[in-house]
Image (tube, rainbow, N blue to C red):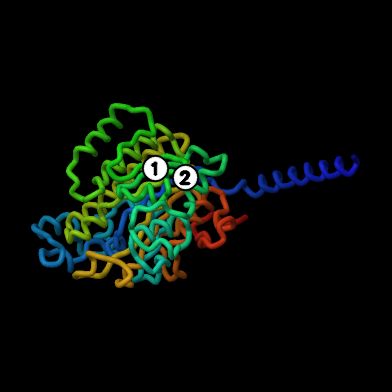
Amino acid sequence: MKNRLRCAVTLAVSVLCAAVFAAAAGKGPKTQNVIFVMTDGLRWQEVFQGADSALMNKENGGVEDTAALSKTYWRDSVDDRRAVLMPFLWSVMAKNGQVYGNRTKSSDAYVTNNLNFSYPGYSETLCGFADPRINSNHKTPNPNVTVLEWLNGKKKFHGKVAGFGAWDAIPYIINAERAGFPVNGGFDPFTSLPSTPRLEMLNVLKNETPKILGEEPFDCFTFRTALEYLKRAKPRVLYISLGETDEWAHAGRYPDYLDAAHRADAYLRILWETVQSMPQYHGKTTLIFSPDHGRGDAPTGWKSHGEKMPESKYIWMAFLGPDTPALGERSNIPAVTQNQIAATLAALLGEDYAGDVTKAGKPIADVLPSKP
């Protein structure tokens, strides 16, 4: 009896000491919510250098009106070109957060799956490791647990995770049936919230829009549905995958590819301004932005990617939030890899994904708050 009492007292003292230490250490990250946006196959070249002059013509980029495209996206300096293409990324994310992947400044970011196409890239990003079994874009349920599902399995995040994707394979990559949280992909109507006139109209318009991009609706439907969910359900972890950058590149339509990148950037601004206007999110939310793979080089390789195009392994990533030091565009640093994103996302929420999933890449230390 005395031994049990002594053990109980010792345990209580240990818990109290741990609580006191945590309070003194600042109780971990300020981030309580994460929004993770991916845009499929957007090259690092456009992100860091803006419109590519080698593609602003009919022969290489399918451009019908070069004067109009130049007026919209061409500027004489690299800084001005990239800023006009992706103004939020460069005026807000880079200024107040961190951007990785400018190969001209010794800041490499790359995938580790060696396949350089979508399903392996999304799976590596969300699971934290490359799986040799994931070697096609077939719509088969992912055998691996994503960081989204892992977080949803924790009490504090359960029922507060959601995913939206333009590509109809996204629910399979997340393994929506097993994951246990709302996932909407492709042209499927979104029915995880009680219907409202706005949601009903989004579902109707998505269904009635011609399938110009195959099984992917235009990004606006995916984004606007996710935004509506954010406002109404207030998730703690929101994942959004956009697809037009990849689709227009495969089609060889450079103006549409640039427009899609510009829209993705505008969507980031809308998300950021929306969460900063909401008490639950203001000052407590981190935004992450990346692609699933890179692309080949101009003048023709940019239309494709894959194992036979080793240059398409190069990607980029950006982070903005209350815990990420404002180091801006990174240069002259060790390479970062796609398999680090999952653990970094979790670590920003105070969770040790890499400790639990030992084959996952480690968090990117510079993105996290410095230890006291």
Question: Whole-Å distance between the Cαs marked 1 and 2?
Answer: 9 Å
Q: Quadrant of residue 64?
A: bottom left
Which quadrant holds the C terminus?
bottom right
Number of residues whose C-alpha sits closer than 10 Å to that of mark 2, classed few (under 14), some (14–19) or many (20 or more): some
From where the camera sits, is residue 115 visible? yes
Q: Position of residue 242 (x, y in %)?
A: 31, 50
Camera-side residue of 252 and 97:
252
Q: Quick one: SS at disc 2?
A: helix
Quadrant assignment, res 15: top right
Q: Residue at x 38, y 31 (%)?
A: 193
Q: Amino acid at mark 2?
A: Ala
Residue under the point 23% across and 34% down = 204
- What percent of the width, then of the height, locates residue 279? 46, 34
Give the residue displayed 39% in from the left and 59% down from the top: 317
The image quadrant that residue 309 belongs to is bottom left
Q: Is residue 347 left or right of residue 202?
A: right
Query: 150 or 287: nearer the eye?
Result: 150
Count of numbered tags: 2
Is label 1 in contact with label 2 (beta carbons under 8 Å)?
Answer: yes
Residue 351 spot, x, y in % from top left: 56, 50
Q: Where is mark 2, residue-wise?
A: 179
145 or 84: nearer the viewer: 145
Q: Is residue 365 visible?
A: no
Mark 1 secondary-structure assignment: strand
x 53%, y 62%: residue: 359
Instruction: Point out which mark residue 329 bears.
Output: none
Residue 336 location, x and y as percent? 45, 65
- The amino acid at mark 1 is Val
* Residue for badge 1: 183
